[in-house]
Amino acid sequence: MCHARQLQLIQGADVPAALPAAYTPEAARGFQVQRIVLARGSLATAEREAFVRRICAAYPHVPVEERLDLPHNRVELGEPDSVRRIMQGKRTLVFGEIALKSAVYENRHQGGMYPHERFFSVYGYCAYSCAYCYLNATPLAAFSPAVRVYVNLPEIAADIARQSMQAARPIGFYLGKMQDGLALDPLTHYSPALGAFFARHPYARQIIQTKAADVRALLNAEHGGHTAIAWTLTPEPIARRYEPTAPPTEERLAAMARCAQAGYPVGANLAPLILEDNWEDLYFDLIRTLLDRVAVRRIYLGGMYLKRLSRRFFNEQTSSWRGAADGQNGDWCRTHGGRVLSYRQGYGRAFFRRIHEYVQRRYRCRFEYGDVNGGSLVVRFSHGQGYRLFPDCPEGGYDSAAT
Ligand code: SF4
């Protein structure tokens, strides 16, 4: 079959033809919406308008502004201070249309954080307020850090289909590098629509990265083994301080177990490792708990990336340099070119060795050491299915996420 014909079939038969409609939107946990803005493209069709209005109805007391002349990334937040603007943005919900070149792309910068990985965005920015979020180092946070829902989902899926057919081999697309991939799912129900699309596509594979715990829509969704989900996990005493609005670690673990039981390949990102007191024991205990409860396919452990505004945000949120940077507690923590953990200087090696020995004793697994974000360790588990998230897809050297 010629390529053009294949593409036509993929786009015609398998790309979600419409926005989700057969569900009742629910307010997303951890998202305190105070303002809703309908930006350019959000009401451009009757289908989009119905989708957007039904979500607005989940916040009956929140004012809705129609700014149909305005691109989604030009919404003014009326706050001159950049850190307070970020917090204002996390209370602002914007509906809009994202340009496809920004929505689905490959990182072609070899020196960048995730070279040659492909990402896609059906959301922009994030309602959670993790102190270390690297999105706060991006222009997005500097200009218009509102939480976006992009309503051109069918067009985004069609572009993923096009790129996958061009690749002509199984290929992974991350949702969660520039947002949390699942936090707004109770509002949008995008996960079942995307799950069905990826399930039916011969080449496209999805990797969702998240801290969310509401997986109800996912559990009933078609996935065909083509959607993997990776949760960021942090020991609860540390999470309370650095991830105050994200679901508790225990709830994330429960969500992971349920999704693994539903057949999703599941991974864990223990990143960033935050060097609070007793951090080695806290993270080690978390890994033991995780492995007792969830059949994870891989665990990524890695460092932190803070620069510019993200560092200022971090300092204001935590009121301390502790565990992060070259401040008052610099005796046990160093920076390296703006990257914060001290693995390069030997600080984490004993911890990695301890993880290595423990996991190797109990599981069939492979270890990969890397130099991403100041040092990283990836443990890939076999479970009798090889060492990949997807048996046929060589994706994924870089698991760390915004989320
Ligand atoms: S780190 Fe992830 S979950 Fe936390 S605010 Fe950033 S994007 Fe959201």
Image (spheres, rainbow, N blue to C red):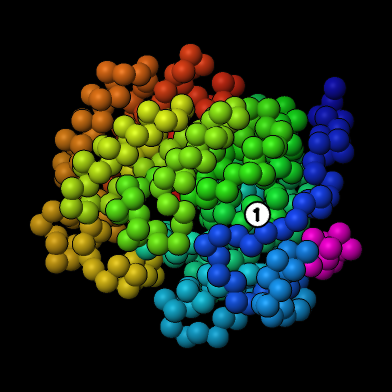
Q: Residue at x 80, y 44 (%)?
A: 16
The stretch of residues the image draws in magenta is: 42-53
- Residue 153 lies, with reference to residue 143, above or below; the image says above
Q: Main secondary structure of the magenta part?
A: helix
Instruction: Depth check: give the residue in front, 370 or 220.
Output: 220
Q: Residue at x 71, y 33 (%)?
A: 222
Tag 1 residue: 186
Indicate yes or no whether the magenta region holds residue 52.
yes
Q: Amino acid at mark 1?
A: Pro
Q: Residue at x 67, y 77 (%)?
A: 62
Q: Quadrant of residue 50?
A: bottom right
Q: Quadrant of residue 186?
A: bottom right
Residue 90 point in image, percent of width and height: 53, 70
Residue, far left: 331
Indicate yes or no whether the magenta region holds residue 221.
no
Residue 298 point in image, percent of width and height: 43, 30
- Residue 52 lies, with reference to residue 226, above or below; the image says below
Residue 26 point in image, percent of width and height: 67, 59
Residue 146 in view of the camera: no
Local secondary structure at mark 1: helix
- Residue 297 lies, with reference to residue 312, above or below; the image says above
